[in-house]
Amino acid sequence: MRTVVVDGGITFSGYDQVLGSNLFRKIIGEFLEELQERSDPLLKAVEVFRKKDGYDLDSLVNAITLLTVRHLSELEGPVWNFLRSNASIFVDFVESLYNFWRSKHRFMVRIRPFHRDPRRRVSEEYALMENGERFETILREMYRSVLRNTKVERLKVLRQLPSGVQAMFLAMNGDERTYGAPLVWSVILKPPVIFYTRSNKRRGVFPVKEGEVSLDASDGWLAFPIHVGKYRFLVLVEQDRLCHGAGLSNLFELAEPDGEFEAVVVFGYPASKLEEDERNGVVFQGERYVGVVSDLPHTDYFGYMKKMILTVHNLMVIDEGRLPVHGALAKIDVGGKEFAVMFVGDSGAGKSETLEALRRMGARVETIVDDMASLDITEEGVVSYGTEVGAFVRLDDLPPGYAYSTMDRSIFMNPDQTNARVIVPFGNYEKIVTPTRIDLFLYANNYEPSDEKIRVFKNVDEALEVFSAGKRMAKGTTSEVGITSTYFANPFGAVQRREKHKEIARRFLEEMFRKGVVVGEIRTMLGIPGYERRGPDEAAKALMDFLRTL
């Protein structure tokens, strides 16, 4: 059991509500099983509770309960004599049990109706927050009481370790729209939020097939309503993967819970119900698009959640004759002149790194799009619309201090591993869905060394050759290695609808050349060994110099 969901409908006020709960017994039972699997010496601390077929959990829980109010030295009997003789190792057992609890992904869910009156909504949110704080205080004080009543010496250092839940959800009862799953209408995070998942890479392309999804999500699921660009999505998340549901709240704008949804994404669908080629992820096309990610261990990565959502978004964009772009868009102010620059490239191409380098050099940079945009043609020119209000940032190639500067608002995923990620909010929904006219449209080339950092294309065919090839040096963000090629650097919809996308891409690039948009490439060299920092720095400086000439 990796994920723990606490019933937020219970008003927590005392130790007995925790110690007497089935959840507490389940945690202790699981902890003992783990100790037995590795023959841990800590088991000596509870040898007195051992039975022929396991451990007497009732007696162990009763002993812990009594130690919250009385000191070990005051208690008489065989059990207490044993614990006094093994007090030191029993303290270690309690410490390890506490850490075992804290290693879980911990959530609180309260089912309450959604109110149109903002004052009633705020009241519900504060009530849940206060209950979460009480729950944390009870757990922490319960742990300290047991230590104080077991140790001979006093506790000299008290650490206010995060002991309660990491995220809280207010949700209304589900209905047919949500496949029966409770629908989240408010999220409360307790930063810094750190989750560890079974995978930290994404692989493959999601196929598109005709079909529908049959799912009863009334037990063990939560539904999240979100805005993805201008569309309303419903994202269903299986309970064991709620860490990814929490991540949604930092990356996308939560939508109001009423009304219909234009697309659905299911995260954690039983792999046994899918064909072999669907188990990495598949998009079913019926009355609406339904993206499905299986419950296999290798898909337990937020990249699968995000990219499935964006794949469905891009398919809808292509159906409308608009151009989805895998890239970043930022307004860059150089010497009082502002330019909207779009960087196009797959994961690890150096888009975020170049923008961060620009900031360090003193340029004012306002990120409008972090990863995916849809382009449209208006009287003003080619304009961009964003999809996300946050960023799923790869930390490996950014300055070491970046993670700490965002810690108080962020959700960290696998921070101790290669391809460590942080989900951090950076903008507001109104801004990203407001059309932004593009001034520069640059392919992010991370694999080609050159002194010429900015190359401007002469015509549409030259531009299409580079953009369509979609080359990059893989940086460990996916299962790919070496120089790879993905059509238009966009395996999220463009590959699946390649022929239609080709027509749209040519039309949009022709419009850019007509309207004077600078179309070219920027060589970030991020994928070249030794240039992980230097490459984006040099590219950023060259871009600043180039913008000053415009």
Image (cartoon, grey):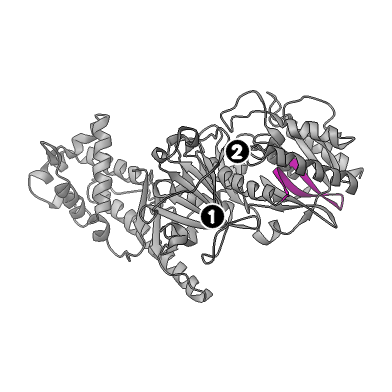
**Residue shown at 47%/36% (left/top)?**
279
Judge the density around disc 1: few (<14), some (14-19), many (≥20) Cα neighbours within 10 Å: many
For the N terminus, the quadrant is top left
Whether residue 143 sits left or right of residue 317 in the image: it is left
Residue in view at x 21 percent, y 35 percent: 43
Q: In the rendered structure, does residue 535 fall within the stretch colored magenta?
A: no
In the image, is residue 11 above or below residue 82? below
Near-viewer residue (24 or 208): 208
Q: Nearer the viewer, residue 420 or 218?
A: 218
Q: Nearer the viewer, residue 391 or 155?
A: 391
Tag 2 residue: 395
State the image coordinates of residue 404 (x, y, percent, origin top left).
Answer: 58, 45
Residue 177 seen in the figure: yes
Residue 134 falls in which quadrant of the image?
bottom left
The span from disc 2 to disc 1 (Cα, nearest Å) is: 20 Å
Q: Is residue 434 left or right of residue 297?
A: right
Q: Amino acid at mark 1?
A: Ser
Residue ID for mark 1? 249
Name above or below for residue 451 compared with residue 403.
above
Residue 538 visible here:
no
Rendered image quadrant of residue 354: top right
